[in-house]
């Protein structure tokens, strides 16, 4: 495997010195890019795109051709794991993900099988290998999964949800059953992330998109505890380097201290926090990734630069910051504005890394 030409991301995640702040965007391969829409049309559907290693590789690389990004992220979806556990994932236009067999009873939880990483998810590992080959050491490749709690919300609801009636119903009425489900999903996710590392992923991110919908106590018991279980089971070194783990709970600002003690290397931060406060709270335990409000990219180039400057100033001097949006880039964003954002991070961050 070729040596990394740009390892800023890995260095910043481990709080090692860098020349400028590394930057990437959540959902950087997506519908805001006309070339993504063209490849998706060629694939037929979003799932066909995920299941074709060549096309998944093509869309993974597309944003890197446009912008000087410091990382690639595997093109896939968090819901591939429940799909591989037999739930039957499909997407309907404008309505998001759906499962043909949601998990809504004790029998359904007990019937859930462990997915086989080769037979059921081999297409993801093939995509990782294809992307690593194509990247040829340009930037590191981030692998990812959903958190067990976030995956469980989709598995129990059968789709996206506003108030999580069914999954919270299960959590309150049958906590033991919920724990059986979360433990099964955690074991599947651990195997999935380790298989991604074996295939060539150089950093890992766990997306806990819906952890912020929980009470503090339920967050600890039903989300964080299972992410800790996963982190404990991960391979943390590959190809002679550490494989950093980023944990992102959207809306988890209240619980940074607990998250920083989870064993991960970095925390993803949404835009509801000030990075100076976040940095003070986590100290030197973890790096921070974030946290520009994605809606900033609707603003003028001048305003985008000002907001980037503000986020850089809030983090302050030194390494340990990976610049990102606080959540995924929206499909309506002008690709030129994304470029202004990425270039502003590199240009304006240099003074923070001198001396
Ligand atoms: O960041 C990247 O570029 C990597 C690719 C990536 C996708 N999904 C591609 C995708 C990643 C990391 C994800 C994670 C994901 N998927 C999450 C967690 C992150 C987050 O955004 O909070 C969640 C909750 C999902 C589940 C999911 N997948 C939903 C709810 C949807 C529909 C959303 C929508 O905007 O319509 C998807 C589909 C999806 N996953 C798209 C992409 C590019 C849009 C599909 C399309 O229509 O082309």
Image (cartoon, rainbow, N blue to C red):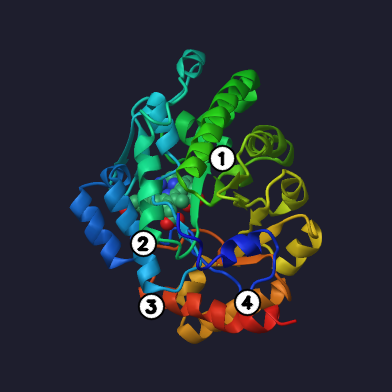
Cβ at disc 3 under 8 Å from ligand 1:
no
Question: Looking at the rendered structure, which numbered label has been put on residue 61?
Answer: 2
Cβ at disc 1 under 8 Å from ligand 1:
no
Question: Looking at the rendered structure, which numbered label has been put on residue 19?
Answer: 4
Q: Earlier in the sequence, mark 3 or mark 1?
A: 1
Q: Is residue 271 visible?
A: no
Of circles 3 and 2, which is in front?
2
Q: Nearer the viewer, residue 137 or 9?
A: 137
Give the spatial CA distance, label 2 vs label 4.
Answer: 24 Å
Residue 95 locus on image (x, y percent): 34, 45
Measuring 73% from the left and 52% from the top, which residue is drawn there? Answer: 256
Q: Earlier in the sequence, mark 1 or mark 4?
A: 4
Measuring 56% from the left and 28% from the top, which residue is drawn there? Answer: 187
Q: Nearer the viewer, residue 187 or 130?
A: 130
Question: Looking at the rendered structure, which numbered label has been put on residue 147?
Answer: 1
User: Taking 2 as reference, is 226 above or below it?
Assistant: above
Measuring 41% from the left and 47% from the top, which residue is drawn there? Answer: 128
Disc 1 + disc 4, Cβ < 8 Å: no
Badge 1 crowding class, 10 Å Cα cut-off, few under 14, some 14 to 19, many 20 or more, is: many
Give the spatial CA distance, label 1 vs label 4.
Answer: 32 Å
Of circles 2 and 4, which is in front?
4
Picture quarter with the N terminus: bottom left
Q: Earlier in the sequence, mark 3 or mark 2?
A: 2
User: Taking 336 as reference, is 140 above or below it?
Assistant: above
Residue 282 locus on image (x, y percent): 78, 57
Disc 3 + disc 2, Cβ < 8 Å: no
Question: Looking at the rendered structure, which numbered label has been put on residue 234?
Answer: none
């Amino acid at each position: 495997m070729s040596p990394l030409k740009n390892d800023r991301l890995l260095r910043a995640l481990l709080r090692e010195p860098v020349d400028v702040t590394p930057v990437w965007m959540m959902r950087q391969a997506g519908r805001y890019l006309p070339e993504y829409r063209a490849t998706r049309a060629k694939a037929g559907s979003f799932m066909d795109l995920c299941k074709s290693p060549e096309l998944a590789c093509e869309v993974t690389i597309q944003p890197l051709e446009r912008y000087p990004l410091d990382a690639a992220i595997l093109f896939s979806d968090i819901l591939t794991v429940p799909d591989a556990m037999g739930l039957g994932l499909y997407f309907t236009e404008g309505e998001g993900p759906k499962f043909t067999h949601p998990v809504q009873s004790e029998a359904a939880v007990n019937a859930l099988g462990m997915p086989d990483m080769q037979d059921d998810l081999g297409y993801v590992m093939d995509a990782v290998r294809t992307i690593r080959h194509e990247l040829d050491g340009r930037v590191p490749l981030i692998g990812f999964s959903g958190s067990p709690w976030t995956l469980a919300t989709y598995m129990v609801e059968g789709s996206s949800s506003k108030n999580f009636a069914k999954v919270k119903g299960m959590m309150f009425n049958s906590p033991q059953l919920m724990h059986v489900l979360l433990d099964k999903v955690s074991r599947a996710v651990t195997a999935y992330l380790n298989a991604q590392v074996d295939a060539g992923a150089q950093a890992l991110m766990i997306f806990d998109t819906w952890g912020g919908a929980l009470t503090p106590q339920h967050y600890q018991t039903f989300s964080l505890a299972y992410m800790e279980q996963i982190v404990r089971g991960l391979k943390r070194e590959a190809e002679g380097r550490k494989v950093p783990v980023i944990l992102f709970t959207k809306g988890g600002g209240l619980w940074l201290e607990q998250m920083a003690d989870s064993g991960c290397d970095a925390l993803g931060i949404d835009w509801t926090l000030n990075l100076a406060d976040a940095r003070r709270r986590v100290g030197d335990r973890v790096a921070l990734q974030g946290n520009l409000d994605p809606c900033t990219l609707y603003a003028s180039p001048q305003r985008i630069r000002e907001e980037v400057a503000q986020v850089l100033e809030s983090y302050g001097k030194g390494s340990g910051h990976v610049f990102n949006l606080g959540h995924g880039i929206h499909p309506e964003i002008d690709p030129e504005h994304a470029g202004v954002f990425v270039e502003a991070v590199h240009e304006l961050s240099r003074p923070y890394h001198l001396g």
